Amino acid sequence: MKMTKPVPKLWVLISITISFCLFILFQIHISDLIAKNPQITQQVNNFFISIASSSSSHHQTLNLTGNANESDENRAKPPEKEDTCAGRYIYMHKLPNKFNDDIIKNCRPLIKWFDMCPFMVNSGLGPQVSVSDNTTAHVLTTRTGSWYSTNQFLLAVIFRERMKHYECLTKDPSLASAIYVPFYAGFDVSRHLWGYNTTVRDELAIKLAKWLSKRPEWMKMNGRDHFFATGRIAWDFRRVSDQDSDWGNKLMLLPEFSNMTMLAIETTAWTNEFAVPYPTYFHPKSLTEISMWQKKVKSVKRRYLFSFVGAPRPKMDGSIRGEIIKQCLASHGRCKFLNCNDSGGKDCDNPVKIMKVFQNSVFCLQPSGDSYTRRSIFDSILAGCIPVFFSPGSGYNQYKWYFPKDYKKFSVYVPENGMKNGTVSLRNVLGRVGKESVLKMRNEVVKMIPKIIYVKPGLVGPEKIEDAFEIAVGRVLERVTMVKRMMEEGKDLQSEYSQIRDLKKLE
Ligand SMILES: *[C@@H]1O[C@H](CO)[C@@H](O)[C@H](O)[C@H]1NC(C)=O
Ligand SMILES: *[C@@H]1O[C@H](CO)[C@@H](O)[C@H](O)[C@H]1NC(C)=O
Ligand SMILES: *[C@@H]1O[C@H](CO)[C@@H](O)[C@H](O)[C@H]1NC(C)=O
Ligand SMILES: *[C@@H]1O[C@H](CO)[C@@H](O)[C@H](O)[C@H]1NC(C)=O
Ligand SMILES: *[C@@H]1O[C@H](CO)[C@@H](O)[C@H](O)[C@H]1NC(C)=O
Ligand SMILES: *[C@@H]1O[C@H](CO)[C@@H](O)[C@H](O)[C@H]1NC(C)=O
Ligand SMILES: *[C@@H]1O[C@H](CO)[C@@H](O)[C@H](O)[C@H]1NC(C)=O
């Protein structure tokens, strides 16, 4: 096969009615709503599962060399024989700098309370962790320079760097199956979250929506083949009113963005949003390196039954963190608490301190904080520590592309209510899990490691790594294919784009 795909001559314009109705419902209480049409969700899910299993046999060869840059986008040349990129070509929009580079150039005000500048280096991976001292060498045991002090909000930069090196990047939009928009939406909103009116907060998103919808690439599928990735949670982009006191901007409510596939470190309940892992500290450059790490965390001796790395949250907000900390401190050494409230949270910015605690623990507690999810979930998986969830929205209903469907295989679920009403003793619940089960779960967690990390951009050798980025891109391509088919068949896209999921319910 030479050409990737025929450009669709026919498509049906389907008007979506993501109407104010839904917005108003959304405003009332989104998490109390259940999917309006579960059958359709089920069908869509089944479809995903069937294409997912058929696509796992793709044979890809990675040959990524040196430092690619955006003007170097055509390494995916149409080859003579078999086109290994068929169906996987992606075109990256060349956005004006104000939509990406200019935003992070002035890095100090990106987050009001925190200096992001040190974390921007190394394509967004942050400063490399030096393994010169003994503790570091012991905890990370790798002399390969693959550990970085990666900040949790850097996903958009890392994702874009990876895309620049994506093996099937094409300069020819007509060849592309999907179109990537390298917008730093999260940094744009976060620099304006405190002390700016809604006009300022929305300005750049509106400009980008206009820019995109005027491009010829948009016309092909009304933007339904477009996608972007953001390193902040989706709630930051779903402001429901134009009152300045409301949180965030309204990027995700703009009609143009509503047509796109949106990747974020945490999603809200809408079906065109997909959760991808927060970046962790480990960005290896070979499969061998990952295998060595997996071997280490499988065999390491773990002193603590469970641990919590985090800060307290006000109990009046319904947080169970106070109860967790209390139980941890009263555990007679069975639980390790790394207090992120101490010393200005410095310990919790230190990859060695965090990895040390998680490597030493059988179970790692992952209660929600300011939002449902936490970066810590991925740090604990990386350390082979079995995550303990207290709400389905913290993991199971988020990272569906990444986590086993059967959550009992890799984690422990303790309903939040049991913590709130004081009937659950974590020490008892976790202490009762049998040795066999622990081993099984840990093996599953360790198996997940390659899937939830972002390997180093551009330095990947011939050993293929199906990492978080590759999985996301694969799923986006599958989704666009499905949407395109639905459009060609004149099917209603509303179900696919505007359903509401219930993040709080176990399926
Ligand atoms: C990778 O690409 C380079 C430059 O295009 C080429 O010289 C080299 O032979 C390729 N290596 C493999 C393993 O295909
Ligand atoms: C990026 O591409 C331009 C034009 O091909 C080239 O001059 C420049 O050296 C490249 N930069 C890097 C870092 O490869
Ligand atoms: C670090 O390790 C080296 C070699 O194992 C040893 O000689 C040295 O004393 C250690 N230093 C500390 C501070 O433990
Ligand atoms: C919003 O803030 C900007 C900049 O401070 C100001 O120029 C503009 O008039 C404000 N708009 C409204 C509607 O208050
Ligand atoms: C979104 O897609 C629908 C068709 O699926 C189309 O009717 C609508 O105009 C698109 N919106 C924008 C802003 O392009
Ligand atoms: C967290 O730290 C702040 C400042 O040091 C302190 O005022 C507050 O009481 C601490 N909270 C807890 C629960 O430790
Ligand atoms: C506490 O919460 C758990 C979990 O939801 C529930 O099963 C239990 O009945 C509750 N107990 C009390 C005393 O409210």
Image: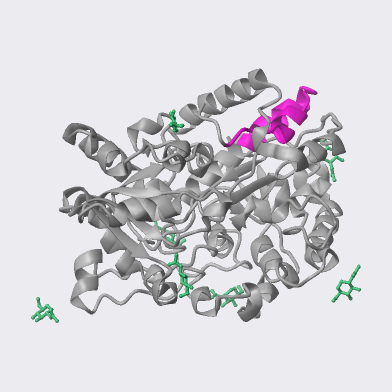
Q: Where 395 falls versus 236 (above or below)?
A: above
Color theme of the render: one colour
Residue for point 41% across, 49% down: 366
Q: How many dots with numbers?
A: 0
Q: Compare residues 131 and 110 and report the one nearer the observer.
A: 110
Q: Quadrant of residue 488?
A: top right
- In percent of the image, x 71 and y 24: which residue is there? 36
Vertical order, 460 against 478 (above or below): below
Left or right, residue 307 beside residue 275: left
Q: Is residue 345 left or right of residue 276?
A: left
Q: Quadrant of ligand 1?
A: bottom left
Q: Is residue 493 visible?
A: no
- Helix, strand or loop for the magenta stretch, by majority: helix
Q: Is residue 301 left or right of residue 87?
A: left
Seen in the picture, residue 177 relative to 210 is either above or below; the reply is above
**Residue 274 at x, y = what percent?**
59, 43
Of 257 and 310, the residue lying toward us: 310
428 on left or right of 173: left
Per the rendered image, the range of residues in magenta is 479-503
Q: Residue 20, image x and y in percent?
A: 86, 39
Q: Where in the figure is residue 49, as x and y percent of width and height?
A: 51, 26
Looking at the image, can residue 424 be seen?
A: yes
Quarter of the image with the N terminus in it: top right
Residue 501 colored in magenta in the image: yes
Query: Is residue 116 positioned above or below 364 on the image?
Result: below
Q: Is residue 202 magenta?
A: no
Residue at 65% in and 37% down: 31
Residue 208 percent location from the top left of the image: 79, 60
Residue drawn at the location 84% of the way across and 29% of the way down = 12
Q: Nearer the viewer, residue 497 or 322?
A: 322
